[in-house]
Image (cartoon, rainbow, N blue to C red):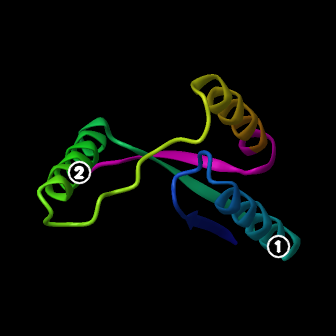
Amino acid sequence: MKIAILTQPLHNNYGGNLQNFALQKVLKDLGHQPVTIDRHIAPTLREKLKFSYFKRLLLSFLGRCERPSFKSYFSKAHEAYICEDVSRFIDAHINTHESMHHL
């Protein structure tokens, strides 16, 4: 049986990627044909999310809400290395079908 797996977008989410890999393996071992729908956030949605973050940041400075956490613990070069490594894992071990997510 063909089975589509809908999950968070595959990227630098190690736990999500490993969980997806394990689910696909179990389904394959049971004789199914799993495929993960690899959703990509549309640029317009990405802009909405950025706006929402900065809105919360402004409200936090005005004392109306808790300050959002949005910081990176890695340098841009390290993030690029991680992204490349994760992309190789996804390409090698997770059967995907790309989809653009629009809102």
Q: Which residues are magenta?
A: 90-103
Based on the picture, tell me whether residue 95 belongs to the magenta stretch. Answer: yes
Residue identifier under label 1: 26
Question: What is the count of numbered marks?
Answer: 2
Q: Which mark is residue 35?
A: none
Q: At numbered mark 2, what does the secondary structure look like: helix, strand or loop?
A: helix
Q: Is residue 71 left or right of residue 53?
A: right
Decide which of 64, 44 is in the foreground and name it.
Answer: 64
Quarter occupied by the N terminus? bottom right
Rendered image quadrant of residue 37: bottom right
Residue type indicated by callout 2: Leu
Decide which of 66, 36 is in the foreground and name it.
Answer: 66
The structure residue drawn at horizontal position 13% and vertical position 66%, both measured from the top left corner, is 64
Examine the rendered structure and indicate whether residue 84 appears above or below residue 100.
above
Residue 39 x %, y %: 47, 50
Examine the rendered structure and indicate whether residue 82 appears above or below residue 11.
above
Real-space CA distance between mark 1 and mark 2, rounded to the nearest whole angstrom: 43 Å
Q: For marks 1 and 2, give the one nearer the viewer.
A: 2
Q: Which mark is residue 57?
A: 2
- N-term mark: 1 or 2: 1
Q: At numbered mark 1, what does the secondary structure look like: helix, strand or loop?
A: helix
Residue 87 x %, y %: 69, 37
Residue type indicated by callout 1: Val
Q: Is residue 31 left or right of residue 53?
A: right
The structure residue drawn at horizontal position 59% and vertical position 42%, both measured from the top left corner, is 73
Q: Is residue 55 left or right of residue 83?
A: left
Q: Are marks 1 and 2 in contact (CB under 8 Å)?
A: no
The structure residue drawn at horizontal position 62% and vertical position 46%, both measured from the top left corner, is 12
